[in-house]
Amino acid sequence: MWKPSERLMDTIRHYASFPATGVSLRQMVQFGDRPSTGTLFRASQFLSEELPIRLAHRVQDLGELPDGLSEMPSIKKVQDWYAQSFEEIITLPRPTLTQEVKARLLRPGRANGGVSKILSETTQNPSIREGQYRSSPNSTSHHNGNGKAAAAAARRYFVPSDDQGDWPPELNDYNERFAKTLGHIKRRHDSVVTTVAQGILEWKRKRQRLQIDSTVQSFLDRFYMSRIGIRMLIGQHIALTEQTHVRHPNYVGIICTKTNVREVALEAIENARFVCEDYYGLFEAPKVQLVCKEDLNFMYVPGHLSHMLFETLKNSLRAVVETHGADKEAFPVTKVIIAEGKEDITIKISDEGGGIPRSAIPLVWTYMYTTVEQTPNLDPDFDKSDFKAPMAGFGYGLPISRLYARYFGGDLKLISMEGYGTDVYLHLNRLSSSSEPLQ
């Protein structure tokens, strides 16, 4: 069983004193178009500094939780995973480069014969309060007088490098090793969400708590938002490395520059109806009507979009079945309406599932809040790839979907009419210039 040494914990504390650097979707796409060995190496350099900072913040956060939560076995296990991943990145041997190669890496790349554009600046998501998902909640300002803010500001998200001519083989070898290490780390962290949820369950049982308080709630928000960011950067880098061999049209890493919203929505509807039929033993799940233009495309991560749609649809279908009774011949139709504006693409999911009392609406956004009488025990191996819970039971679907929406500058809102039904509004920022909410 791997355990961190005291020396490693000291290094982690040092890294945790630096702020994270937020990145926008547009920056990732501008950088990642046709990556070469040199450009990928610059990306690796950025990530080999940025990821340890983000991982270090999480190790510290997990060790400083209130009311004995840090002592829970599952929380300790996750803390060790983050520390181990931190160690693997910082101990990966770097190649020795000649002065000439170093100078060439620093020269800006050329795009279509001209000097490449500087990556567009990022903007703040209007749905998020300043510092709401900050990596280190204690730092009131970046300008803490020790130059660390300046160091972070200098750590720009990758800029394409000059790609005329060949690069030395050491760079290619390092790129491959770095991507392999990241793949290993990504697999290790697959079941983080379920393991932390298990830790919260252990704590609730030990302390005999029915609900979690606002401190734990804001820790979970920060923790899971940071996890989305870490997995996004890792997944993007692994996909870019693979795309140096095989290129997919419309894809830059895991970002699709022409995500067809209608196709993603149809697939999510099919999956949610299938899970609903399976869970309630229905011959046919409630029908879902989709209103959307056929050719509505925008730049997004299809995996994030399908996750959010699946989770919100699953909630709607469950409410409809439980309100009207599983033995009903015909259920009211749930409507999914997708509209495009200049700034946002908005998806409205309207159900006739009886609605939620106004007093319960804030609870919908708390983790581990569920209307299911008995929260099922979590199987640690259960669907490691992402947190797709069974039909109901963990109270994770909506809060995590809202984080996914906010990660790229969108939001998830809920309006309910008790006694009738609920409307969920999913706003997706189509300008793709919003920065990750991590600074």
Image (tube, rainbow, N blue to C red):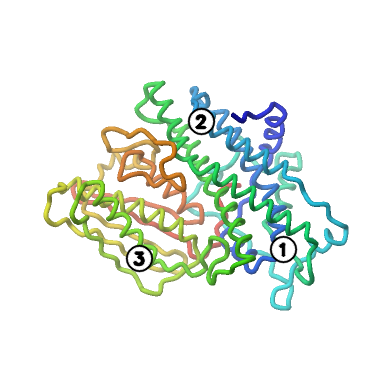
SS assignment at label 1:
helix
Q: Residues within 10 Å of mark 3 (few under 14, many from 20)?
A: many
Q: Residue at x 49, y 62 (%)?
A: 300
Camera-near label (2 vs 3) is: 2
In the rendered image, the quadrant that contains the N terminus is top right
SS assignment at label 3:
strand
**Marking on residue 75:** 2
On screen, 351 above or below 221? Answer: below
The amino acid marked with disc number 2 is Ile
**Residue 196: image location, x then y, percent:** 47, 35
On screen, 251 above or below 318? Answer: below
Q: CA distance from mark 3 to mark 1?
A: 40 Å
Q: CA distance from mark 1 to mark 2?
A: 38 Å
Residue pointed to by mark 1: 37
The amino acid marked with disc number 3 is Ile
Q: CA distance from mark 2 to mark 3?
A: 39 Å
On screen, 357 above or below 127? Answer: above
Determine whether, in the image, residue 403 is placed left or right of residue 283. right
**Residue 211: image location, x then y, percent:** 37, 30
| Earlier residue among tags 1 and 2 | 1
Determine whether, in the image, residue 369 is placed left or right of residue 329. right
Residue pointed to by mark 3: 338
Camera-near label (1 vs 2) is: 1
Camera-near label (3 vs 1) is: 1
- Compare residues 93 and 355 and report the one nearer the observer: 93
- Compare residues 38 and 175 and report the one nearer the observer: 175
